[in-house]
């Protein structure tokens, strides 16, 4: 009977020391990621508190309360952190969905919002008794931390530890991450998508498909995970061959990836009589639509506001959302260029996710490449942070933080600037 050779004591000690060092290095990187994330959340909280105090103290004398007809006279911290879509997620968690679909623009209803996030809000509120608002903010902050840790792992796998640290610092202070401090779904969406990408890399096909499937019950943009899983399965089958049973297991990922959206459609069929009630609500009531001319339309609209007619969107009649959309479009193409420069490091699955979400943003009439959509296309933001160094990196980080400080208060109060 043969026996395995015993490890040499010196060699065993070396392996042990190497394992301990690797573990300590991993713990240090995790601590760094969480510290940076916490620092960014404290900045967003500080901005909300300062704005609340300023408007509460001086708003009635300076006209600050005229930011929007919907602005309360004395905004609370809760009203700021649940502005925009947050109000609708709170309504969905509290009252559920309507039984019928309205067919008139402006007749807003909760059917335009996916169910998983408000379901988790309701469940956490019932268990902890912190209310739907507290539950929504807690979920957003916690999943934001988890998503940041997972995205940091992906960045390290693509670019190595040093460049990943720069990338994640830029990521945490990127203006669009304000939604991690609001009642919004992006933190949950990105947690599931980043998990899916990691699991696909590890060939955990069923779990990857379940993560993608859960994401499709959070936000429509997560439907981009379906082609991600399909491409991953196709590459596995091409590499190992159809006859390999382990390769065929890769098909579990694309088969499970539409699960959340399919379950929601079935529910809507029984609840409202139409499996497409969510799409109808978004398209008709919320005026969501797609066109290849979305960005050019924004550009010419800004030109008209500047030089021809003006408007009522913001200061001087300029639509601030349009300004950010154009700036975001430029940033998106810059990030895509930097991704292409490092294409050997970035897996195909990350490319598929990025390009699908970028296409949705570039053709959306309501959610063009603003900071929030750029956060969803996270490889683009990471590529900028990883590619820059030295003075260029410090300058970019300074611009990010400055932009965050300037636009976040406008996002928190009123209806001038969408997240």
Image (spheres, rainbow, N blue to C red):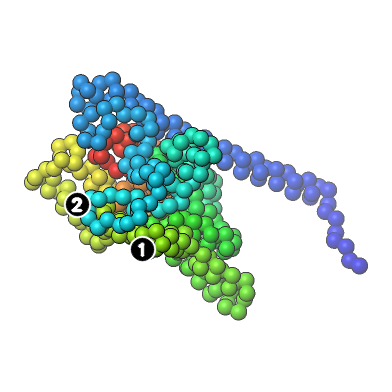
Up the image or down, 376 lies above or below 393; here it is below
Q: Residue at x 37, y 36 (%)?
A: 81
Q: Is mark 2 on a helix, strand or loop?
A: helix
Question: In percent of the image, x 52 and y 52: which residue is there?
Answer: 154
Q: Earlier in the sequence, mark 2 or mark 1?
A: 1
Quarter of the figure with residue 27: top right
**Vertical comparison of 308 with 264: above or below:** above
Which residue is nearer to you in this view: 337 or 30? 30
Foreground of the two, 209 or 126: 126
Say which of marks 2 and 1 sits in front: 1
Q: Is residue 384 visible?
A: no
In the picture, measured across the screen, residue 4 lies left or right of residue 264, that is: right
Outermost residue on the right side: it is: 1
In percent of the image, x 8 and y 46: which residue is there? 308
Q: How crowded is mark 1: few (under 14 residues within 10 Å), some or many (20 or more)?
A: some
Rendered residue at 48%/42% (across/down): 139
Q: Position of residue 98 (x, y in %)?
A: 35, 52
Q: Where is residue 386 in the image (x, y as percent from the top left)?
A: 45, 47
Residue 56 visible, this orientation:
yes
- Please give the residue where the numbered disc 2 appears in the rendered image: 299
Report crowding for label 2: few under 14, some 14 to 19, many 20 or more residues within 10 A (C-alpha).
some
Seen in the picture, residue 155 relative to 203 is either above or below; the reply is: above
Q: Distance between the residues labelled 2 and 1?
A: 40 Å
Foreground of the two, 301 or 109: 109
Residue 136 in the image: state x and y as whole percent: 44, 40
Q: Where is residue 331 in the image (x, y as percent from the top left)?
A: 32, 49
Quadrant, the C terminus: top left
As helix, strand or loop, the secondary structure at mark 1 comes to: loop
Q: Mark 1 points at which residue?
A: 273
- Counting the numbered discs, the total is 2
- The answer to whether 96 appears left or right of 156 in the picture is left
């Amino acid at each position: 009977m043969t026996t395995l050779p015993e490890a040499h004591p010196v060699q065993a000690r070396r392996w042990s020391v190497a394992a301990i060092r690797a573990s300590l290095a991993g713990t240090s990187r995790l601590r760094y990621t969480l510290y940076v994330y916490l620092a960014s959340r404290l900045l967003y909280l500080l901005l909300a508190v300062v704005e609340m105090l300023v408007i509460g103290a001086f708003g009635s004398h300076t006209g600050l309360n005229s930011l929007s007809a919907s602005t309360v006279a004395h905004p609370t911290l809760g009203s700021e952190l649940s502005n925009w879509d947050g109000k609708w997620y709170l309504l969905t968690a509290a009252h559920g969905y309507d039984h019928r679909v309205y067919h008139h623009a402006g007749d807003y209803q909760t059917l335009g919002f996916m169910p998983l996030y408000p379901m988790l809000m309701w469940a956490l509120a019932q268990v902890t008794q912190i209310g739907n608002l507290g539950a929504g903010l807690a979920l957003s902050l916690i999943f934001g931390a988890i998503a940041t840790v997972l995205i940091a792992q992906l960045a390290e796998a693509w670019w190595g530890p040093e460049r990943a640290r720069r990338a994640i610092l830029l990521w945490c202070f990127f203006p669009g991450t304000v939604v991690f401090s609001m009642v919004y779904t992006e933190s949950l969406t990105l947690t599931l998508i980043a998990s899916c990408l990691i699991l696909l890399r590890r060939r955990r096909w069923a779990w990857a498909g379940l993560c993608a499937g859960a994401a499709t019950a959070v936000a429509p943009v997560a439907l981009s995970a379906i082609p991600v899983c399909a491409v991953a399965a196709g590459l596995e089958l091409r590499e190992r061959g159809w006859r390999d049973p382990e390769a065929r297991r890769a098909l579990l990922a694309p088969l499970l990836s539409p699960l959340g959206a399919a379950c929601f459609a079935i529910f809507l069929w029984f609840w409202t009589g139409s499996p497409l009630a969510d799409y109808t609500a978004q398209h008709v009531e919320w005026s969501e639509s797609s066109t290849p001319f979305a960005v050019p339309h924004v550009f010419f609209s800004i030109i008209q506001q500047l030089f021809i007619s003006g408007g009522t969107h913001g200061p001087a009649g300029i639509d601030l959302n349009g300004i950010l959309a154009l700036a975001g479009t430029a940033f998106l193409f810059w990030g895509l260029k930097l991704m292409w420069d490092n294409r050997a490091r970035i897996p195909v699955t990350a490319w598929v996710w990025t390009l699908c979400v970028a296409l949705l943003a570039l053709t959306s009439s309501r959610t063009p490449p603003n900071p929030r959509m750029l956060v969803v296309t996270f490889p683009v933001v990471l590529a900028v942070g990883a590619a820059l160094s030295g003075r260029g990196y410090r300058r970019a980080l300074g611009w990010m933080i400055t932009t965050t400080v300037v636009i976040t208060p406008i996002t928190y109060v009123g209806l001038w600037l969408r997240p």
